[in-house]
């Protein structure tokens, strides 16, 4: 009811307008958009970091590889998106350019957090200036610097480091399962099984291994991507 009142009063007309209770409604709408996107899970393990993504592509006329939401940013960094794919593409390209600029300037690989911070800064700007809407996408970065790391950026431009996290559809239910079953000493194989078990429990009869993609980065700092039944062999 309160949200409807805010709409009638016009507090949702611009991303630069605060409602009386301190909310920016356009940002909250964008967060709802993210929860309509397909889900992804990220887990930090003792031997690397894993990202598993639900492609949720059901149209047999579409090439499934084109629906993959896991992108390589640098040799040791991947990112997965939930929300508006075109928004994600723009931010991923920005992250890739930043990574290459760092290598050219410093002759060394960038840290995962430095890339995350720059992308989060871009997202924050679109909540502060008029004439543009916020990015309707959440990005989860997995990388291996001196150790495996996992970061997530939200619509507002905030970012946090996680041991395990989920974005997209049913994210709160997935995070509840992760809180229950995550262990800091689990390896990549155990993390893969946990991720697929969670998806299977939540999706029920709709679960099918062919709709999932994954990427893992181990201590060799090399990205290994896989899809479908190959996830069971990881």
Image (cartoon, helix red, strand yellow):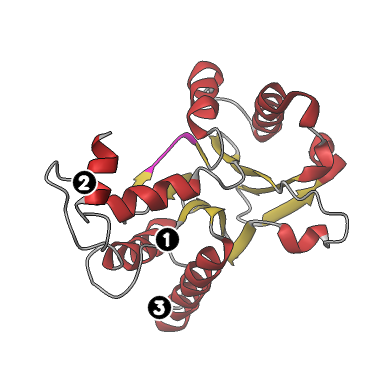
Label disc, if present, on residue 106 of the rendered structure: 3
- First in residue order: circle 2 vs circle 3: 2
Q: Which mark is residue 23?
A: 2
Please tell me whether residue 215 is drawn above or below residue 1 in the rendered image: below
Please say whether residue 156 is visible from this viewpoint.
no
Callouts 2 and 1 close, C-beta under 8 Å: no
Q: Residue 142, can we see it?
A: yes
- Stretch in magenta: 161-165
Looking at the image, which residue is at 27% across and 50% down? 7
Magenta residue check for 186: no
Distance from Cα at disc 2 to Cα at disc 1: 33 Å
Depth order, front residue of 1/98: 1
Asked if residue 172 is positioned above or below residue 77 in the image, the reply reads above
* Label 1: how many Cα within 10 Å (few below 14, some 14–19, many 20+): some
Which label sits in the foreground, 2 or 3? 2
Q: Are marks 2 and 3 in contact (CB under 8 Å)?
A: no
Q: Rate crowding at label 3 as few (under 14), some (14 to 19) or many (20 or more) other CA atoms within 10 Å.
A: few
Q: Is residue 164 magenta?
A: yes
At mark 1, the secondary structure is loop
Does label 1 or label 3 sit earlier along the sequence?
A: 3
Tag of residue 111: 1
- Quadrant (top left/top right/bottom left/bottom right) for the N terminus: top left
Percent x, y for residue 185?
55, 25
Residue 50 point in image, percent of width and height: 61, 42
Identified at 48% across, 78% down, the residue is: 97
In front of the other: 101 or 210: 210
Residue closer to the observer: 75 or 118: 118
The overriding secondary structure of the stretch rendered in magenta is strand
* Disc marking residue 13: none
Kindly report the distance in space between the C-alpha atoms of the residues bearing marks 1 and 3. Answer: 12 Å
Q: Nearer the viewer, mark 2 or mark 1?
A: 2
| Quarter that holds the C terminus | top right
């Amino acid at each position: 009811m309160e949200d409807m009142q805010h709409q009638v009063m016009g507090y949702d007309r611009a991303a630069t307008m605060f409602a009386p209770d301190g909310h920016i409604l356009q940002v909250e709408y964008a967060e709802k958009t993210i929860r309509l996107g397909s889900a992804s899970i990220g887990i930090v393990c003792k031997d690397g970091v894993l990202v598993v993504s639900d492609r949720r592509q059901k149209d047999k006329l579409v090439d499934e590889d084109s629906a993959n939401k896991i992108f390589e940013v640098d040799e040791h960094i991947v990112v997965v998106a939930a929300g508006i794919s075109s928004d994600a593409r723009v931010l991923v390209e920005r992250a890739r350019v930043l990574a290459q600029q760092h290598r050219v300037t410093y002759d060394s690989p960038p840290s995962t957090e430095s890339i995350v911070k720059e992308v989060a800064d871009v997202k924050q700007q679109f909540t502060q200036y008029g004439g543009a809407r916020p990015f309707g996408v959440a990005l989860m970065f997995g990388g291996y610097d001196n150790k495996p790391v996992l970061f997530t950026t939200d619509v507002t431009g905030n970012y946090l480091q996680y041991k395990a996290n989920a974005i997209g559809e049913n994210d709160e239910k997935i995070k509840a399962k992760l809180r229950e079953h995550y262990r800091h000493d689990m390896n990549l194989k155990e993390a893969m099984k946990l991720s697929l078990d969670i998806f299977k429990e939540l999706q029920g009869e709709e679960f099918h291994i062919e709709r999932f993609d994954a990427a893992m980065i181990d201590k060799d700092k090399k990205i290994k991507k896989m899809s479908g039944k190959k996830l069971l062999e990881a």
